Image: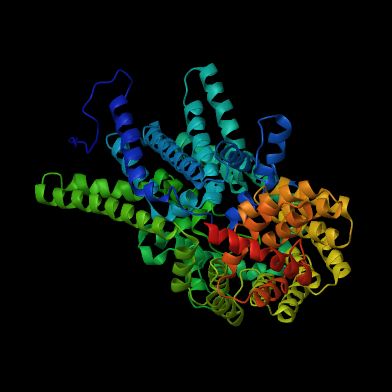
């Protein structure tokens, strides 16, 4: 109910202090988030999900032994965001690659972040320095600002885009660390205070282990302590600076020590320089603020198109954006003594954009980067809205209008979140939306082309790949190699191998470390009969990416062609360990057994292959030859009968010739004359059996 102090509570009794208030927050947030995010639970894998989770064998946890858990911490040979990757591994252990479990965990993380954000804001507003101004409305301010943050459409990518759990999990532990620091700092009991500081430290480590942008947490805590606990005095500022300056220098040097070798090199693959990035980011910050204040559906996308600032005056908005940010932060510092809460909220926003919005050669703009910085963004706005509500409290009509306005704002944000989740349900809807909103970016066109290609819509895919190349607008220069590789895949599908080879070679020229380009070259060389050249290229690809199932699978096929049967068997088994759904290694194993004269084992493997690929003509050919060799007339007749069904109205000879003409990437290569003889020799028996039936 709404009381005279604008408090919203549950009308229930509770012995816990402020229990009914907390109960309302816990229940209301849960219900609201379930409603607006309920349509996200079956959203497909997108973009970096595939590389970080689906294709990342390290997170495919088989058991909970320490040796297995330890492997989950590594990505591409480095310990990188181990807490996030371990959480993905647990999801995989309990639910495999079913997206439902991953989405549920992501929403739980967001929900817990919102709960701790409320607790942090509520307890902050009751600090001695703020109590006089905010204590009466502390609960209402905390509640409204938490809701505005939790249901902001800006958070959708951090919640519904599975891999961005990295951002939301870092945020959850970040706000937990701040809350426990507050509790420890204000505790009257020494032991209890120390316990809170221990939990704060643990939360901070977990936050940093989720994503590196949490490195600004110590600075945030020191500024928080100075502004809102100690208070701005000359003595307190000097005392805090003695700690903050060495800490900041240590953090900066630490980041440079870890990244210095790659910072400048990273710009070699970007369409902008370090100076241009620093000039552009102020405009990005202003855009983020506008998204938070004006969150309409048409303004959101996974990939945004923003002009790079080449100088202070190109585009003209560069200098005004810089001056505006300087003014806002200057105001925050100047007003810190009189309005410490507002000042801290402003500084907190920009401070926590420092890592991803400064010197590091990252992409210029992503919505999910606002997850931590925006946590306190709505506190001043909620304070203002409730102050206006209080001001007109004796004018019932105005009070009702404002209350309805706040309710509509919450509804509108919730509706936009729901609409964004509909877009994120499939790759097709995601990239179609992105291409519609930002048609001049190459990457969305390329990704939409990949969606079409995987759906068998080759010419639609070709159109998008062509648009991507013609636009020549890349987030990374080496993306051009990806686009040429996709062109190569298209040409392979339409059986234009020479054109495919040219595209793969162009991709390799642009990016020699791009393993798929070498994989593509190896495929074409194998189809052309250049087995040795194919072997050379696929081994180079595996040196770059030794954990690729499809590369190991192709190597197993090449080894089979080279007659290295035992090595082919080893590679096939390795492929199945990396991807148990891959069927090529099953066919290779079958052919290894056939070459070794173990007919029954070969039959068993080909039958397993055909079970997963019931329309495979090649599998039918292999089994026809094996059943004929084994003298199993019944299964031979049955298999020839099924082949006739696959043949349809085609002439049998033309069907066999056409089917055996394009088997360059198949484990079994049938002898056309022998196959025709076997079928003709048994076709009469099959027709007699059909007549009997």
Q: Out of 309 and 631, give the one closest to the viewer.
A: 631
How many badges with numbers are in the image?
A: 0
Residue 616 shows in this picture: no
**Residue 530 in the figure: left or right of residue 179:** right
Locate residue 657, reporting x and y percent.
71, 75
Locate the N terminus by quadrant. top left
Locate residue 85, reporting x and y percent.
63, 43
Establish if 685 lies above or below 657.
above
Residue 273 shows in this picture: yes
Establish if 25 lies above or below 546.
above
Residue at 56% in and 28% down: 199
Q: Out of 473 and 669, give the one closest to the viewer.
A: 669
Based on the displayed image, in which of its 4 quarters is residue 132 positioned?
top left
Q: Out of 365 and 519, give the one closest to the viewer.
A: 519
Locate residue 124, reporting x and y percent.
41, 35
Establish if 444 lies above or below 232.
below
Q: Out of 205 and 466, give the one closest to the viewer.
A: 466
Residue at 49% in and 58% down: 367
Based on the displayed image, in which of its 4 quarters is residue 627 positioned?
bottom right
**Residue 622 in the figure: left or right of residue 232:** right
């Amino acid at each position: 109910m709404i009381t005279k102090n604008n408090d919203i509570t549950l009308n229930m009794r509770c012995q816990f202090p402020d229990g009914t208030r907390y109960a309302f927050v816990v229940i209301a947030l849960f219900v609201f988030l379930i409603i607006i995010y309920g349509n996200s639970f079956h959203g497909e894998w997108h973009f970096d999900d595939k590389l970080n989770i689906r294709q990342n064998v390290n997170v495919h946890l088989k058991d909970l032994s320490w040796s297995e858990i330890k492997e989950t911490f590594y990505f591409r040979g480095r310990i990188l965001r181990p807490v996030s990757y371990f959480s993905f591994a647990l999801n995989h252990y309990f639910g495999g690659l079913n997206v439902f479990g991953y989405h549920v965990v992501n929403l739980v993380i967001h929900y817990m972040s919102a709960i701790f954000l409320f607790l942090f804001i509520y307890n902050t507003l009751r600090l001695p320095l703020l109590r006089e101004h905010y204590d009466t409305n502390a609960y209402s301010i905390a509640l409204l600002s938490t809701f505005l943050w939790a249901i902001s459409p800006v958070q959708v990518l951090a919640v519904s885009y599975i891999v961005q759990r990295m951002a939301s999990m870092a945020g959850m532990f970040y706000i937990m660390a701040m809350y426990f620091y507050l509790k420890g700092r204000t505790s009257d009991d020494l032991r209890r205070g120390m316990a809170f500081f221990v939990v704060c430290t643990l939360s901070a480590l977990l936050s940093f282990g989720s994503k590196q942008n949490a490195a600004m947490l110590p600075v945030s805590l020191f500024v928080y302590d100075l502004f809102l606990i100690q208070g701005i005095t000359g003595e307190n500022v000097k005392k805090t600076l003695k700690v903050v300056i060495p800490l900041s220098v240590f953090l900066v040097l630490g980041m440079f020590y870890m990244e210095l070798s790659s910072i400048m090199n990273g710009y070699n693959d970007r369409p902008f320089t370090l100076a241009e990035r620093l000039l552009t980011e102020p405009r990005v910050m202003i855009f983020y603020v506008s998204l938070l204040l004006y969150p309409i559906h048409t303004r959101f996308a996974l990939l945004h198109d923003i002009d790079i600032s080449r100088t202070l005056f190109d585009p003209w908005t560069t200098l005004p954006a810089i001056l505006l940010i300087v003014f806002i932060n200057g105001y925050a510092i100047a007003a810190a003594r009189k309005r410490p809460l507002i000042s801290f909220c402003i500084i907190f926003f920009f401070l926590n954009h420092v890592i991803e919005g400064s010197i590091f050669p990252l992409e210029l703009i992503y919505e999910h980067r606002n997850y931590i910085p925006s946590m306190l963004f709505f506190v001043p706005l909620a304070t203002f809205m409730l102050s206006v509500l209080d001001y007109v409290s004796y004018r019932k009509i105005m009070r009702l209008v404002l209350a309805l306005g706040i309710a509509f704002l919450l509804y509108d944000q919730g509706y936009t979140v729901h609409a964004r989740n509909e877009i994120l349900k499939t790759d097709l809807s995601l990239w179609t939306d992105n291409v519609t909103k930002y048609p001049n970016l190459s990457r969305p066109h390329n990704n939409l082309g990949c969606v079409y290609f995987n759906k068998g819509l080759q010419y639609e895919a070709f159109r998008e790949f062509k648009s991507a190349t013609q636009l020549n607008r890349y987030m990374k220069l080496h993306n051009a190699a990806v686009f040429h590789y996709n062109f190569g895949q298209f040409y392979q599908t339409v059986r234009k191998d020479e054109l495919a080879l040219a595209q793969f070679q162009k991709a390799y020229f642009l990016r020699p470390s791009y393993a798929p380009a070498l994989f593509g070259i190896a495929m074409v060389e194998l189809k052309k009969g250049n087995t040795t050249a194919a072997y050379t290229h696929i081994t180079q690809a595996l040196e770059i990416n030794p954990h690729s199932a499809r590369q190991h699978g192709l190597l197993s096929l090449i080894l089979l062609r080279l007659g290295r049967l035992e090595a082919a068997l080893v590679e096939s088994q390795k492929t199945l360990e990396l991807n148990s759904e891959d069927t090529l290694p099953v066919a290779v194993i079958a052919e290894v057994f056939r070459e070794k004269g173990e007919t029954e084992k070969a039959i068993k493997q080909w039958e397993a292959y055909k079970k997963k690929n019931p329309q495979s003509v090649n599998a039918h050919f292999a089994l026809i030859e094996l059943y004929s060799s084994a003298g199993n007339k019944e299964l031979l007749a049955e298999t020839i009968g099924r082949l006739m069904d696959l043949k349809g109205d085609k002439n049998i000879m033309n069907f066999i010739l056409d089917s055996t003409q394009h088997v360059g990437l198949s484990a079994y290569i049938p002898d056309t004359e022998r196959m025709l003889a076997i079928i003709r020799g048994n076709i009469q028996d099959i027709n007699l059996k059909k007549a009997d039936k």
